[in-house]
Image: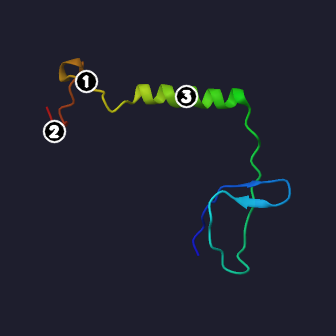
Amino acid sequence: MKVISLSAHFDGQSIQLDEPYKFEPNTKLIITILPEQSAEYEAWLYLSKHQLNNAYSQDDEYPLDAIKIANPDYEGS
């Protein structure tokens, strides 16, 4: 069996998978407890993701004359 990760949560009484998954009897498991993330941490993650999306947009189009030193090995030149 390959190693996989499954999302789950503790409902106060037992561990509940977030999506169904069929286990074989006696399947060995490792449980990792994730610390709760603060609202500030979540805000930083959102801001980082947003800024990365801005920096690496699919719409980026750079004209060849913007290049200061041409690479002679580049196939497009």
Q: Quadrant of residue 20?
A: bottom right
Residue 5 image offset from top left, x and y in percent = 62, 60
Going from N to C along the chain, the mark reached first, 2 or 1, is: 1
Residue visible at 23% across and 18% down in the picture: 66
Label 3, label 2: how far apart the Cα atoms are: 34 Å
**Which one is closest to the eye, mark 1 or mark 3?**
3
User: What's the residue type where badge 2 is placed?
Assistant: Glu
Q: Please name the colour scheme applied to the rendered image.
A: rainbow
Considering depth in this image, is 73 or 44 the residue closer to the camera?
A: 44
**Which one is closest to the eye, mark 2 or mark 1?**
1
The C terminus lies in which quarter of the figure?
top left
User: What's the residue type where badge 3 is placed?
Assistant: Ser
Residue 24 image offset from top left, x and y in percent = 66, 79
- Give the SS element for disc 1: loop
Residue visible at 56% across and 25% down in the picture: 47
Considering depth in this image, is 66 or 58 the residue closer to the camera?
A: 58
Label 1, label 3: how far apart the Cα atoms are: 23 Å
Q: To which residue does mark 2 refer?
A: 75
Going from N to C along the chain, the mark reached first, 1 or 3, is: 3
Residue 19 image offset from top left, x and y in percent = 62, 60
Label 2, label 1: how far apart the Cα atoms are: 16 Å
Any mark on residue 62, and which?
A: 1
Q: To which residue does mark 3 refer?
A: 48
